RNA sequence: GGGCCGCUAGCUCAACUGGCAGAGCAUCGGACUUUUAAUCCGCUGGUUGCAGGUUCGAGUCCUGCGCGGCCCA
């Protein structure tokens, strides 16, 4: 370039546009072509293994340094590292998270095989290996290949194995790469799987039946949230992605399924944040004959079961409300992080009414009977309110602004106002409030439940109040759901319902501060199609 | 939707008030039959997210756009 600048000036881009590939990618394509030229399929159809690498590690766990077993295995995996290039080379083969070293010796593999390993195989390729299980002098369990086959040629280089893949966007968009490079990512999703399993086990142990109800709803319901709209061509009608399975599940209770749960996705067309993904996983359950006390007991049992499945009940979580601490990341690099703070899931979860929490936070003996006073308290604490808000919404506003973030250890907030609880049963002995509770941990909501409203006439009145709010411009307010009302009119037993946010629970139990870290493919804007 | 920040080689990151776009790892060539962040020698590799503008000169300054992050609504 420096000796002939005119060449690039005349025709910039020819060198790259000819292939459009980086040197590394072009080389790998050349190697694929070379394999094909030799009649070797770089993407063969099958490779019958005798052992997974985890099985190899388990079966040959206690060998002495330098051991030669004479045992031959057929294994497969992705080559994730390679060193040495002469008559002896080493590789790291990884299969389902377990790595075993390849001890690639020309004596065992032959000249041609050795040439394949050093000249045709790249880090990132899937390999099939037949070879002897052995241990090196340094004590590393290894396989000495007698035969070595490319099972899937990688055309793109892997990110750096040591520095990993740091870019949050790439990690989310190309989760497969994140999983290859960052062992922590694999651990997080293994924990997620264990948590889901634990939640199901706990529900089944308690006699609940898992069901699947529609995700395409003619009318969105069961929560106050903006829905996604889609369209069915044959029916020529709009459908909504469900914002909650609640109303269908309660219809099953009407039908006599006395303990049901659904563990699956719901969708809310709202802002995204470190704690909100447009599609999210919720465990929702309904138990006939029970009330909010049973609901809280269930929620507590589920959280404990999940925590035990992935560790202990004594956990820590980054305290985003505390001053950041400087963390030494490497020689020179430092980073600021929130300090870890203990969270105890061991003690029985506390229970406090919303009103008591607001009274404590404000130091004032407020009540639901004096709207003017509540407005004044809001103003005093710089909490915004709307003129159409009743006492319930005012108290809730104070709670959200002044209290929520302070609830670090698990606590059930009880007695939610009727005004913000259109599906919950009124409190059996108190005005203004319902038998509704929410579970808070580390300053966030994790669960929401209540003794269900089972009186169809009361339910109709609440729906109509919601519909009126919708008419007045509240596009999160509910619709009147006639099929649900009809079901209720057939008679609904006393029932307690519970919804548990699974993504947030996984965050809590893995220490993740962003929901994107616990969802394999979080919602992102589409990639620009240029690449 | 608003504010702030980020986008540089395959990956991780540099580049002072505008002055020749660099390093480590990976890749490539060479040496090496017990390495494991292998080591040693040598060399490549760039549309600085995109499009404009200012300037003798832009990774750097200005405008718009794209994607992402954090905070706020």
Image (tube, rainbow, N blue to C red):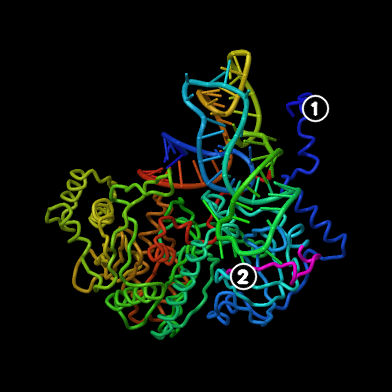
Tell me which residue sits at (66%, 68%) in the image. Answer: A103
**Tally of numbered tags:** 2
The residue at which mark 2 appears reads as: A95
Mark before the other along the chain sequence, 2 or 1: 1
Query: Is the same chain shared between marks 2 and 1?
Result: yes
* Few, some or many residues within 10 Å of mark 2 (<14, 14–19, 20+): some
Q: Chain of mark 2?
A: A
The range drawn in magenta is: A98-114
Residue B56 placement (x, y as % from top left): 63, 13
Q: Which mark is residue A7?
A: 1
Spatial separation of the CA atoms under disc 2 and disc 1: 47 Å
Q: Chain of mark 1?
A: A
Q: Nearer the viewer, residue B36 or A341?
A: B36
Residue A315 placement (x, y as % from top left): 33, 66
Q: Do tag 2 and tag 1 residues touch (Cβ < 8 Å)? A: no
Check residue A170 for magenta coloring: no
Residue A27 placement (x, y as % from top left): 76, 50
Q: Is residue A453 visible?
A: no
Name the quadrant containing residue A111: bottom right
């Amino acid at each position: 370039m420096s000796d002939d600048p005119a060449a690039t000036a005349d025709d910039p881009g020819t060198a790259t546009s000819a292939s459009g590939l980086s040197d590394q990618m072009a080389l790998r394509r050349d190697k694929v072509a070379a394999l094909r030229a030799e009649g070797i399929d770089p993407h063969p159809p099958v490779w019958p293994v005798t052992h997974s690498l985890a099985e190899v590690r388990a079966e040959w766990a206690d060998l002495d340094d330098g051991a030669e077993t004479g045992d031959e295995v057929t294994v497969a995996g992705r080559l994730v590292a390679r060193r040495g290039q002469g008559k002896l080379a080493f590789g790291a083969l990884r299969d389902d998270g377990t790595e075993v070293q390849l001890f690639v010796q020309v004596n065992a593999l032959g000249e041609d095989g050795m040439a394949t390993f050093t000249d045709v195989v790249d880090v990132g390729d899937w390999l099939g290996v037949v070879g002897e299980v052995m241990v090196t002098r340094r004590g590393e369990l290894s396989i000495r290949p007698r035969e070595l086959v490319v099972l899937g040629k990688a055309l793109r280089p892997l990110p750096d194995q040591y520095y990993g893949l740091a870019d949050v966007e790439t990690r989310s968009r190309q989760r497969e790469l994140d999983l290859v490079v960052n062992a922590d990512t694999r651990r997080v999703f293994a924990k997620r799987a264990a948590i889901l399993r634990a939640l199901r086990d706990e529900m089944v142990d308690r006699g609940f039946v898992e069901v699947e109800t529609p995700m395409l709803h003619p009318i969105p319901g069961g929560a106050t949230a903006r829905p996604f709209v889609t369209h069915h061509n044959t029916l020529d009608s709009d459908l909504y992605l469900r914002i909650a399975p609640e109303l269908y599940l309660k219809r099953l209770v009407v039908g006599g399924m006395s303990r049901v749960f659904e563990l699956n996705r719901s969708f809310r067309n709202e802002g995204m944040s470190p704690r909100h993904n447009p599609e999210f996983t919720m465990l929702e359950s309904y138990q006939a004959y029970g009330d909010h006390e049973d609901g809280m007991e269930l929620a507590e049992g589920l959280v404990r079961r999940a925590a035990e499945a992935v560790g202990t009940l004594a956990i820590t979580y980054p305290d985003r409300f505390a001053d950041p601490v400087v963390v030494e990341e490497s020689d020179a690099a430092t980073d600021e992080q929130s300090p870890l703070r203990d969270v105890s899931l061991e003690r029985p979860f506390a229970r406090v009414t919303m009103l008591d929490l607001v009274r404590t936070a404000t130091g004032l003996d407020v009540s639901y009977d004096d709207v003017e006073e509540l407005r004044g308290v809001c103003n005093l604490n710089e909490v915004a309110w709307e003129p159409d808000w009743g006492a319930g919404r005012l108290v809730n506003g104070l709670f959200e602004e002044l209290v929520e973030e302070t609830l670090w250890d698990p606590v059930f907030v009880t007695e939610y106002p009727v005004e913000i609880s259109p599906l919950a049963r009124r409190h059996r002995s108190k005005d203004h409030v319902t038998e509704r509770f929410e579970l808070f941990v580390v300053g966030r909501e994790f669960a929401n439940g209540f003794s269900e409203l089972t009186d169809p006439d009361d339910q109709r009145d609440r729906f109509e109040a919601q519909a009126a709010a919708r008419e007045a411009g509240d596009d999160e307010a509910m619709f009147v759901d006639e099929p649900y009302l009809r079901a209720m009119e057939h008679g609904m037993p006393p029932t307690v319902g519970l919804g548990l946010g699974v993504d947030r629970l996984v965050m809590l139990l893995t220490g993740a501060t962003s929901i994107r870290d616990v969802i394999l493919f979080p919602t992102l804007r589409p990639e620009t199609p240029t690449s």
